[in-house]
Amino acid sequence: MGKLDGKVAVITGGTSGLALAGAKLFVEEGAHVFISGRRKETLDDAIELIGRNVTGVQGDAADLDDLDRLFDTVRREKGAIDVLWASAGMGEQRKLGEITEEHFDATFGLNARGTLFTVQKALPLFNDGGSIFMTGSNASLKGYPEWSVYAASKAVQQAYARVWLSELKDRRIRVNVLTPGQVATPKQEELFDEATKRQFESLIPRGTMGHPEEIATVALFLASDDSSYVNGMELTVDGGTAAI
């Protein structure tokens, strides 16, 4: 028996990296998973990798019309949601003095605004007793140079969780933040050169990056009844980086 048997899960940004690993694990544990992503080719590849019990919806989590299309598809095909993992996000380096309006608006538009409206638009479909969690970043805990806009856009999620759990307590819907550290993903390969990766690895106590599957198992914990007494928490999964 799987930990998510009969459950319906929605994962935004679920076409690559840690969210894709989570989607695959959720299906293995019995869920039907809806994933969204901006690029059709990447979405099709993710669906093929997961293999079964998955529905892909192309769209940008920063676009409210695309979010409506995502949740209309969920309503039409399954009618309800048990788990929402708002994982779509972006981040680019900009140091103070070089930050542009376009950079700020794009980062907050997806990470802060997009996350809020993802949750709000999912809410009418949510079953009581469900689980909502968002992907944070330990950049909001560590103060890495050149990452102030990204860090700030992720820090809002802890505030969201604390307020929303109070607003949703009568429905017993839990709200948490899953905060990873450096994880070896295709996006990281795109963003960082070898020297930057080595620098980040030097900050991790074990000396190596995390793997998407290591984040996926924590996502399963938050999605399942194993975390029934965990609410309003930021669960940091970074190998101890933020602790030292």
Image (cartoon, grey):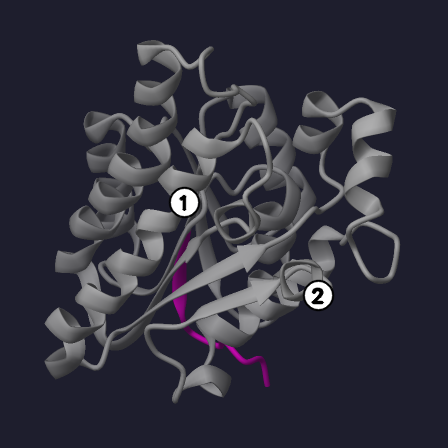
Front residue of 136/143: it is 143
Q: Dominant secondary structure of the magenta stretch?
A: loop
Residue 51 seen anywhere in this rendered image of the structure = no
Task: Choose the circle earlier in sequence order: 2 or 1.
Answer: 1
Q: Is mark 1 on a helix, strand or loop?
A: helix
**Label 1 neighbourhood size at 10 Å, few (<14), some (14-19), many (20+)?**
many
Left or right, 172 with respect to 147, comes to left
Quarter of the image that includes the C terminus: bottom right
- Give amino acid for label 2: Gly
Residue at 41 percent across and 45 percent down: it is 154
Residue at 72 percent across and 58 percent down: it is 213
Q: In which quarter of the image is residue 132?
A: bottom left
Residue at 46 percent across and 20 percent down: it is 96
Residue 36 sits inside the magenta stretch: no
Label 2 belongs to which residue? 240
- Give amino acid for label 1: Lys
- Magenta-drawn segment: 1-10
Label 1 belongs to which residue? 154
User: Residue 166's spot in the image, x, y percent?
Assistant: 15, 74
In the image, which disc is placed on residue 138?
A: none
Q: Is mark 2 on a helix, strand or loop?
A: loop
Distance between the alpha carbons at the discs numbered 2 and 1: 19 Å
Left or right, 156 with respect to 226, comes to left
Residue at 49 percent across and 77 percent down: it is 5
Up the image or down, 209 lies above or below 128; here it is above
Q: In which quarter of the image is residue 3?
A: bottom right
User: Residue 206's spot in the image, x, y percent?
Assistant: 87, 61
Front residue of 73/220: it is 220
Front residue of 92/40: it is 92
Whether residues under marks 2 and 1 lie with C-beta atoms below 8 angstroms apart, the answer is no
User: Residue 209's spot in the image, x, y percent?
Assistant: 80, 49
